[in-house]
C-alpha cells in the first residue's frame, strides 16, 4: 500500500506538472479540462496496473527435474495479534480523518439540495433559476443558477453574466468539482489533488469567459463588467462563482492566442507521456520460462555400461529407479496420457529399451540443493510482508521472524513467482520463498543426491525414431562431434525463446509445467521434424512448435569436420505457480 501511495503521488504530480508548465498556459480550454480529468484517473490507476513479462533462468546444463524440496503440508507458526501495532494506529488515523471529511462532503452536498428544494424556482432561457434571499452574485450548481431575488425582479443582472453562468450549467462544471471533492475525501493526503481542484476551477472560468466572448461581446467591456462585480465573498461548496479571485489570470487568458500547430503538437505529446508513465509506474510480474541447454543425441549405453560409467556416482540408475514404472503414451491430453504404448519397470528394461528410452533417465534424476545463503540486502527485502510469503524449515511464518536470523544462518533459500490467479487470501503476495537452516538442511540431507526417485511412475511421450534420428544416435564419440549452436550461443537462444514464448491466456494451472520437445537441425541450419515428446495442452504445445519454427538458422552440427543433421532434445520448465 505504501508503494502504491508513493507511486500514485509521483504520477499525479508529474501529470499535473505537464499541465502547469505547458498545457495550462495555452488557449485550449476544452482539451485542458479533458486532460485534467483523465490524468486524475491515470495517476491513481497506473500504479495498480500489472504488466506480465517473461523471465528466463540461465542454465548451463540440461535440467534434471531441479526443484526445491518443499514439504507437501505446512504448519503455521502461532502469531500474536497486537491491536496497537503501528499499522493499526495509522489505519485508525486515516479512517478518522476520512470519516470527518465524508461527513463534511455529505453536509455540503445536502445543503445545496436543500437550497434548491426550499428556493423559488423559475425557468429562464433553458435554465432553472433558484431565487434566494442572500445578497450575492449568481452562481451555479448542477443545472441550477442561484440568483438574488431582488436582482432578478429588477433586472440587475447583465446579459454577459447570464451567458457566463449558463455556460457553467451547459458544460456541467459542477460534476467536475463534486468528483474531485469526493477524491479528496479518500485521498486527502495527496497534495496534488488540491492543485488539480484549483486548476479545474480556473479552467471552468476560462471556458465560461470564452462562451461569453464568442457572442461578439467586446473583450474590454466584458473585463470592465467583471471588475465592477468583484466581491471577496467566499463561494459556496461545489459552485462556480465570478468572485473566485482569478480575475488577473482570466484577463490574461482572454487575450491569449495559441497557434493550431502548437496546440496539435502539445496534444500529441500527451500520448508518449501516458505511455512512459504506464511503463515506469506499473507493477511487473514475471512468468519464468526455463529452457534447457540442447545437446546432440548420444548413444544410449546398455545396463552394464551404465553401471561402469556410474562408479563415481553415489547411486546408480538401477538403484535410483528401482521399482519405478515407465509409461510411454502416444500423446498427452493435459497431464493425462492417451493410448498407452509401452509400460515396464526399470528392472524389466532390455538392452533395446535402454537404447530407445534410456536417454530420459538423466532428465528425471534430481540434483542435490547447493548451499546458498541470502545477502544482507536480500534478507532485509524479504521482510516485506506485502511482497513475500515466507517459510522457514517448512513452516509458514511471519516475515518479522526473519529478524531473528542472520544471512549465514540459512544453508539454502529458493523461491517462485505466484501469478495473480494462483494467489489466495492467506497468501496474496506475488512471491513465495523457502529458507532452510543448516540443521534442517543437514537433517533432511538436502545437499545429498536422492538415493531413490520420489515417485512410483514416470509418464512419457516418445515419437518413433526417424532415419535422421537413427543416424544422430549412432554418432561418433563426443570428442569427434560438434553440437549445433544457436547464433550467439545458448544464452542468446534462451533469450530468444523467453522473448517469443506467449503464455496462453486460458491456461489455468498452479503446477510447474515440465515439457520436452525434439527437433532436427539440418545441415543448412534450419529446424524441422519438431515433435512434442511430453506436452501439456494443444495451446502450449503449438506455442512451443511455433517458437521453434520461427527460430533463426542455427550453426549446423559437425562430424569429422563435415556438417551433419542432428536431432536435438529440449526439456522446458514453465513456472505457473
Image (tube, rainbow, N blue to C red):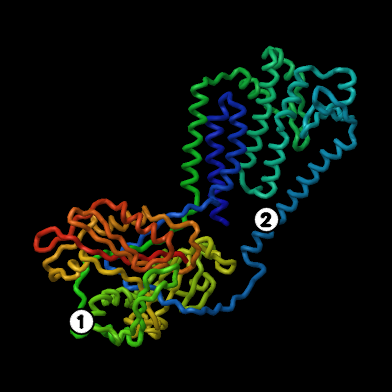
Image-based side of 415 in relation to 60, left or right:
right
* Mark 2 closeness class: few <14, some 14–19, many ≥20 residues within 10 Å: some
Quadrant showing the N terminus: bottom right
Q: 14 left or right of 539?
A: right
The alpha-carbon separation of the residues under discs 1 and 2 comes to: 72 Å
Residue 94, label in figure:
2
Q: Earlier in the sequence, mark 1 or mark 2?
A: 2
Q: Is residue 238 above or below residue 480?
A: above
Is 326 placed left or right of 76 in the picture? left
Label 1 crowd bin: few (<14), some (14–19), many (20+), radius 10 Å: some
Residue 411 image position (x, y, % from top left): 38, 76
> Can you give x and y, in whole percent of width and height, for residue 392 in the image?
47, 76
Q: Position of residue 145 (x, y in %)?
A: 80, 29
Identity of the residue drawn at 32% across and 67% down: 571
Describe the element under mark 1 as helix, strand or loop.
loop
Q: Looking at the picture, does residue 519 appear above or below residue 181?
A: below
**Which residue occupies the foreground of this view, 482 or 235?**
482
Quadrant housing residue 125: top right
Question: Image check: 280 left or right of 497?
Answer: right
Q: Nearer the viewer, residue 448 or 476?
A: 476
Q: Is residue 489 above or below residue 264?
A: below
> Which is closer to the viewer, label 1 or label 2?
1
Residue at coordinates 90% horizontally, 23% vertically from top-left? 150
Asked whether disc 1 touches disc 2, contact meaning CB atoms under 8 Å apart, the reply is no
Name the residue at 45% across, 57% down. Answer: 504
| Numbered circle sitting on residue 302 | 1
Amino acid at each position: 500500500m505504501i508503494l502504491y501511495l508513493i507511486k500514485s503521488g509521483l504520477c499525479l504530480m508529474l501529470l499535473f506538472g505537464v499541465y502547469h508548465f505547458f498545457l495550462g498556459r495555452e488557449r485550449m480550454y476544452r482539451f485542458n479540462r479533458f486532460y485534467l480529468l483523465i490524468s486524475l484517473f491515470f495517476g491513481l490507476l497506473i500504479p495498480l496496473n500489472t504488466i506480465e513479462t517473461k523471465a528466463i533462468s540461465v542454465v548451463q546444463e540440461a535440467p534434471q527435474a531441479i526443484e526445491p524440496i518443499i514439504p507437501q503440508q505446512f504448519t503455521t507458526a502461532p502469531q500474536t495479534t497486537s491491536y496497537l501495532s503501528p499499522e493499526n494506529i495509522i489505519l485508525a488515523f486515516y479512517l478518522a480523518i476520512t470519516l470527518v471529511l465524508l461527513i463534511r462532503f455529505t453536509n455540503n452536498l445536502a445543503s445545496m439540495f436543500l437550497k434548491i428544494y426550499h428556493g423559488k424556482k423559475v425557468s429562464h432561457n433553458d435554465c432553472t433559476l433558484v431565487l434566494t434571499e442572500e445578497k450575492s452574485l449568481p452562481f451555479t450548481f448542477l443545472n441550477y443558477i442561484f440568483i438574488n431575488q431582488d436582482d432578478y425582479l429588477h433586472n440587475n443582472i447583465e446579459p454577459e453574466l447570464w451567458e457566463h453562468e449558463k455556460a457553467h450549467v451547459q458544460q456541467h462544471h459542477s460534476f467536475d468539482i463534486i468528483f474531485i471533492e469526493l477524491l479528496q475525501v479518500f485521498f486527502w493526503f495527496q497534495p496534488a489533488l488540491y492543485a488539480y481542484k484549483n486548476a479545474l476551477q480556473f479552467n471552468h472560468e476560462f471556458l465560461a469567459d470564452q462562451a461569453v466572448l464568442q457572442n461578439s461581446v467586446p473583450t474590454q467591456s466584458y473585463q470592465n463588467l467583471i471588475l465592477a462585480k468583484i466581491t471577496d465573498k467566499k463561494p459556496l461548496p461545489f459552485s462556480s462563482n465570478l468572485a473566485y479571485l482569478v480575475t488577473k489570470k482570466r484577463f490574461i487568458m482572454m487575450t491569449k492566442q495559441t497557434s493550431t500547430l502548437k496546440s496539435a503538437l502539445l496534444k500529441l505529446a500527451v500520448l508518449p507521456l501516458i505511455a512512459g508513465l504506464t511503463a515506469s509506474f506499473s507493477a511487473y510480474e514475471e512468468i519464468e520460462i526455463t529452457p534447457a541447454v540442447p545437446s546432440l543425441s548420444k548413444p544410449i549405453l546398455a545396463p552394464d555400461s551404465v553401471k561402469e560409467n556410474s562408479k563415481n556416482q553415489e547411486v546408480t540408475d538401477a538403484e535410483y529407479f528401482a521399482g519405478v514404472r515407465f509409461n510411454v503414451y502416444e500423446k498427452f491430453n493435459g497431464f493425462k496420457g492417451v493410448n498407452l504404448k509401452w509400460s515396464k519397470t526399470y528392472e524389466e528394461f532390455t538392452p533395446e529399451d535402454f537404447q530407445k528410452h534410456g536417454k530420459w533417465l538423466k532428465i528425471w534424476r534430481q540434483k542435490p540443493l547447493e548451499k546458498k545463503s541470502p545477502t544482507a540486502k536480500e534478507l532485509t527485502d524479504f521482510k516485506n510482508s506485502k511482497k513475500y510469503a515466507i517459510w522457514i524449515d517448512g513452516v509458514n511464518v511471519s516475515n518479522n521472524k526473519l529478524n531473528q536470523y542472520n544471512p549465514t544462518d540459512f544453508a539454502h533459500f529458493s523461491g517462485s513467482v505466484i501469478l495473480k490467479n494462483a494467489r489466495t487470501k492467506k497468501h496474496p503476495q506475488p512471491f513465495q520463498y523457502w529458507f532452510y537452516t543448516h540443521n534442517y538442511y543437514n537433517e533432511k540431507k538436502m545437499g545429498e543426491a536422492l538415493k531413490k526417485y520420489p515417485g512410483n511412475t514416470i509418464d512419457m511421450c516418445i515419437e518413433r525414431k526417424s532415419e535422421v534420428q537413427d543416424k544422430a544416435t549412432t554418432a561418433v564419440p563426443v570428442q569427434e562431434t560438434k553440437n549445433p549452436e544457436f547464433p550467439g550461443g545458448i544464452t542468446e537462444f534462451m533469450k530468444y525463446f523467453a522473448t517469443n514464448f506467449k503464455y496462453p491466456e486460458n491456461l489455468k494451472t498452479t503446477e510447474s509445467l515440465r515439457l520436452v520437445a525434439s527437433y532436427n537441425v539440418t545441415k543448412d541450419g534450419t529446424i524441422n521434424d519438431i515433435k512434442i515428446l511430453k506436452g501439456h495442452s494443444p495451446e502450449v504445445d503449438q506455442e512451443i512448435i511455433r517458437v521453434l519454427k520461427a527460430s533463426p538458422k542455427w550453426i549446423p552440427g559437425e562430424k569429422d569436420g563435415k556438417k551433419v543433421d542432428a536431432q536435438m532434445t529440449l526439456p522446458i520448465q514453465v513456472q505457473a505457480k
